[in-house]
Structures are given as structure tokens and as C-alpha cells.
Amino acid sequence: MATEPGSVTDPSGLARVPGPWYHAQVPGTAAGAIRAIDGAAAAAAKTDAVDWWFVTDVCGDGPGPWRLEFDGLASHAEVWAGDDLVLSSESMFVPAAVELASRPGTVTLAIRFPSLDAALRRRRPRGRWRSSLVSAQGLRWIRTSLLGRAPVFGGVPAPVGPWRAARLHDGAAPVLSDRHVVTTVEGGAGVLDLAVRVHRSAAPAPVVRLGDLTVDGTIVDSGPGAQEVRAHLRVPDVRLWWPHTHGIPVTYPLSVVLGEHVVDLGAVGFRTVCAARGDGGFRLSVNGVDVYCRGAVWTPVDPVGLGGRDQTRATLERVVGAGLNMVRVPGTAVYEDAAFWDDCAELGVMVWQDAMLSTFDPPDDQPFLDLLTAEVEAVLRPLSGNPALTVFSGGSETEQQPAMLGLAVPHMTAVHDVIPAVVGRTAPGVVPVSSSPTSPPGSDALATHVGTGIAHYFGVGGYRLPPSDVRQARVRFAAECLAFSIPPSDAAIEAEFGSLAAAGHHPRWKAAVPRDNGASWDFEDVRDHYVRTLFGEEPSTVRWSDPERYLALGRAAVCEVFAATLGFWRRPDSGCDGALVLALRDLEPGAGWGLLDSDGRPKAPWFVMRRMSLPVAVLLAEDGLDGLRIDALNDSDHTVVGELRVQVHTRTGARAFDVTEPVTLAGHAARRWSLDTVLGRFTDATHVHRFGPRGYESVTVTLSSEDGVVAESVHLVGGPARALERTVGLTAVARQAAPGDWVVDVGTDGAAQYVHLELRGFEPADSWFHLPPGGARIVPVRRTGTADAVTGHVRALNSVAVTPVVQVCT
């Protein structure tokens, strides 16, 4: 229930308030409770404007004392048990616990979350600079999320409530209150050191289990009601944990046995991680192997209720299926729960974790620093030993903000002293970073510079530079990049907004388009700029007459810059060792930054990024007077033995060249060719020399092994601006490749640009790809609804004709 700020200060006063009461789910938020009654009202809820009360009755049976635990209360909170105020919390990110005397029968628990708006009216010392992200500068003092509090997040409500699990333990079983694990690798063996603190355990001989190994633990401290248990284990010939792109992500279950009780301590892994920074870059190596990091900035799958366990798992599985190996949890969001981290370890996804600091001047006030210390420890200690945690950063744009305001970056105790110290002693196997972005240690470069250190690169994107800028920007590691307002599918737009005509200036549509605070433009303007410069069409004119083509051109423009930028960065000689796109998933329906829409469905550039990110991939790119460059990359730990096939088609559709050569591509290796070298003659296939009219239409390169096609890439010669033809002769046939498994066979007579499948009840594994003249592709599709058969249509950007999907019986 909501009450006016300060009008009710203890549970007894709630009887005077008429309501309404909302049924609340815990873990959950006030906005989540409103959503359960009226979804539309949740987005508009001003949750910071009022006090919120969460009240429930719990059974008091069982032996005392009780231990009441909250994993997260957002943001300030007061907890009553009956008439007693038993706990106060000042941070959304620090767990809170209290011991209660035994209470038979039933006890009423009540939690008050005071209005954050009211708290922000309190005058506090100003920072050395103003954050450009938000208007309420007092937020720098409050340990809470910027979700719903920064305009860039659009219609997402601010999180208020018991957003993490709440537990009431009786005295019948031991309760884990602290856990610290350090894993190292020494000479092929895994070494684990464990320290846990357990309440209500009288077991004289604790036993620690790691996989199939068992050792006796040592009780080093036995205070009133608690024991500290330590153990040291050594695993000979340990199986290392790898990011899934480079090997197998092996983990070991860890537990401690206390008498008849087994306390699960989660899964741990053994791996080494280091960062090379000596040459001004930032290159991560895992187990001694350099890793090209590719992925996206993580966003909560349920930004309203902060739940969504199944969606989180499904989203991470998509990450793995797309060949992405890293996500970054930014300082503008929330720390994810234990299940997220378990999934990342199991699936082989590296995590770059920011402290929840962003653009503010973090106070040097000692109580603030103590609270921040407790926060970082509360994040790291439960995660210690989890191999997915790879990088820990002191925040998002914490150093960049003063630099962008023309100030010298000052020493920030929180960022430069407190956080690195906590990371060093708590997670010694994790790479520390002062903030994101940041210049190399000891460098005089600014955090705004993109050619050294860790960059947030939006030259291609927000700053509207041509795709060629990526070659001269010399980005070494992009912890954020390529922010575009990306339209979801036509079907998603029609379902949410009623018509494709809403795309553009409809207020609901514009509300979901990202926009920097105070800017006179938004990221849809950015996308339209690239439509104009890449395809030579005026987007506003197309939008008025043909909203469907306007949206298709916008998606294709984003695909084009993704291909140019990410394709260049993944080349082994690009000098770039990582690229994380902003962002992985939309927070609300519409054309947000996400590669996935707010329901987790892929948008157009997802497919482009996937083809360039798979562990084994073929990249094609024009390299000026050197013609077409071919790169074959193998990040996996096994050797690919097969052949490279190169086909070149003329503008008439004839196959001018069809050449194969044997290829052996070792694990964790890459090879490079020029097209003319493979063909054995000069061709000017890319028409860079301009000798007469352009003679070639496309180049297709396929890497195959004995198991079939491993990777394939098609390059259309002549640039993205192509004539719109009446038809290119597309065909689309759906068939069952196996019982319950469907594929769509897509073929074309002429060169087809950005072929995309729009299906009902099914989702394609690939889309937004090119086909050469006479080309074909078999596209597996996955059922997402209740449809028994595949229906829909297939389009190409350079064709007016729309091809229906035809089903055949097999």
C-alpha cells in the first residue's frame, strides 16, 4: 500500500489508511504489484513519490531464535516484527539480517520504504561536477539503482520494495551467513581455499565436498551461535573452465556437511584470467589463451518486478547460441541474483560487473564509503570461486563524466581506493578496472579517448561518423558501442502499437526511443542518418508513403554498420580485443537499444552479430586496392580440417569462378587470404580500380569439414545502395527435416539483399542475410507458439515482391 510521505511511521497507523492494498509477490517491487492488477499503470507509477508498506503474517512455530534475512530492500527500509522496529537498511544492494526471539503463533512483518523523492529534498554537499544522466543530483548519496530515475530508461518505473528474497529461519537447521572461496590453478592442479560462517551448527566435524573429493573442515572460530569453518582442497589434473567459445565451461559442485545437514555452496570453477595493458590496450587471456570478447551490455529481463528467472535463463542461452561470450552488467542497473551467476558459469559466459556507480562524483564521506564497501563485499563474497566473474569495474562512465565536462579527472576514493582494495582481497582471480571507460594505467590519455584503454565507442552510431571511421579510431576494447534505436519485428510493432504507421512520431512510439538527457536529437534520428547516407533514400519521405519499407531500411542500415564495425574488430590484426554492444535487450516495447526486444525476441542486427561471433566464422570485407579479404577464425579448442570454397558470380548471374582449396584451421587460430590469391589471378572483383563497368555481383565463401558446412559468408559487390527490383525470384519452402523439426528452404534467382523471414508461431535461426544469384540457404526454425505448420513470408530489401512460405509434405 502507498501512503503520503511521513504520514504513517509505524504499522499501527495503517489502520487509518483506506488503501488500496495490492497483492505483492516477494521477491518483487511495488510496480510489479501494480502491474499484476493493471499493466499499463505500472509504467506510469511514480513509485518514488510516496511511502510504500509491505505487510504479511508469518507462522511463528518452530524453535527459536529466528533469523530474519533480506537479500535486498530497495532503497531505504524499516522492518517491524509485530510492534517492534527490528531492522533498518540504507542500501538497495546490501543484505540485511536480524536475530529475533522465539515467537509462538503468528507474527506480522511490516516493511516501510520511505519516499525517495522526500529523501532527496534533504540538502547535502554538492559534488565536484553535475551528472548529465539525471536531474536529481542528490542520488549520488543514495545506494540505489538508476533504473526509472534516469530519462534514458524511458517508461520503466523506479524499483521500490523487497526486490530480493526474504527468509525466516528457525533454529532447526544451520544457516549460512558468509561464504568466501578462492580458486587458483597451480601446475595443472586446482587449489581451493574455503571459509564459511554458519549459524546454529553444533557439528563437531564439518566435511567439505568438491565434486568427488571430500576433506575434513577445520573449525577456527566458534562464537555464540556461530562457527567459522575453513578447508583447503587440491584437485589433481583439474578440468579448467573456459568461455564456451573457447572450450568447455567445467564447474564443480561445492558443499559443506554439518552433521545431518548439507549446505549447498554453489558451483565453482578453476581458470586463470589476466589482462594485458602494457601496449595501451586491454586484452583478456583465459588459461593463457587470448580471448576476443564479444557480447552486449546486460539489462534486467524484468525491469518492473526485477524477477524473470525463466527469461534470464532463456536470454543467456540465446547469448551462447549466438556465439557471444561476455555480458557487462552496467553501473546504471542492478546486481543480478545467484541464479544468473550459476547460469553464466554453467553456460560459459564471462561477466564484466560494474559497481553500481555512474556519472556521479561519489562522496568521500566515510559512512558512504563504508556502505559501498559492504555493498561490494556483499556482491563478491557469495560469488567468490564463480569462474564467470571476469572483470570488476568501479562504475559506468564514472571517470568519463568529469572528462567530458572539461575537468581533470580527480582522485575518487570510492573508485580508485575502496573498490580495488575490496576486489583484491575478496576476488583475487578477477581483473579490476577503475571504471568503464578508462585510460590505460599511467597514461595521460583521457577517458573520452577511444584509441587506448577501454572505450565507449559511438563514433559509428551516436556521433554519425561513416562506417569507415572504425578503421581509424583504433579502438582497443569497446565496453559499450553501437547504440541504435532498433525496430522490433513488424509483427511485434503491430501487436503493441496497432499499426506500422505508429513508427516515427507517435507519442507512444517516441516514448520508447532512447534519448540522451538534454539532447535535441534521439537515436531514431541516428538510425535515419545512416539510412540516408548508406542507401541514398530520404527516410522521412519513405516513412510517409511506405512505413513497412521505412522500417526495413532502418533495420538494414543498423545491420550494415554492425557488419562493418564488428567484422573489422574481430579481425586478428584490428588491434581490438573486445566489443560489447549497447544493449542486449529492450526494457520496454518499442525501438530501443536492444539486440533483443522486450520479450526476448531477436531483432535484425542480432543475426548479423551472430554470424560474425560464432566460434568458427568466415568474414569478408573490402580492403581497398587489395580487393576482398577473407578471414577464417577458429576460437574453439578443436582443429577444423576441410576445404574453403570460393564462388564469384557476375552481374548476369553466371558463376565466373568456383574454386576450392584444402584448409586446416587449428584451434584458437585464424587464417587470412585475399580473394585474388585464392583465385590465382587479378580480378578487381570489388571494382575498386574502376576498369570499365562493374562485372561482378557477389562473392560467396564457404568453410566445410567432414560434418558439412561450418561457416559461410556472402558479400554483395557494389555497396548497400542497390536498385529496388520488381522481384529477385525468391522462393521459400517449409518442410520437416525430422519429426517436429522444421526448416525453411530459401532460394533466389537474382542477388538478394538482406533476406528476412517473417513467420507466425516460429522463429528462424538465421535471417537478414544476403544470397548470391541462384543461391540457397536452409534455415532451421523453432516453434514459439501453438502453430502446427510454418506460415509467413520472406522478403529481400532489394525486391518489391513478397514471397509466401509454402509448406510441402515429406
Image (cartoon, grey):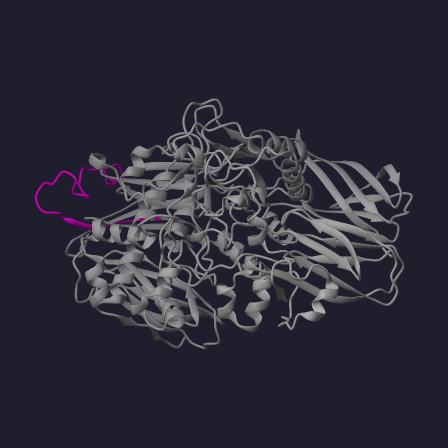
Number of dots carrying numbers: 0
Residue 584 point in image, percent of width and height:
46, 52
Residue 133: in magenta span: no
User: Would you place residue 144 above or below residue 726 in this image?
Assistant: above
On the rendered structure, is 691 left or right of 368? left
| Magenta span contains residue 683 | yes
* Image spot of residue 672 (x, y percent): 34, 36
Residue 28 image offset from top left, x and y in percent: 62, 61
Residue 150 in sight in this render: yes
Quarter holding the C terminus? bottom left
Please state which of residues 341 and 221 is positioned toward the viewer in this rendering. Answer: 221
Please name whichever residue, 488 or 295, is drawn nearer the observer in this view of the structure.
488
Q: Residue 806's spot in the image, x, y percent?
A: 33, 75
Q: Which residues are magenta?
A: 674-702
Q: Quadrant of the N terminus?
A: bottom right
In the image, farthest residue toward the left: 692
Q: Quadrant for residue 464, please give it.
A: top left
Position of residue 784 relative to residue 376, above or below, is below
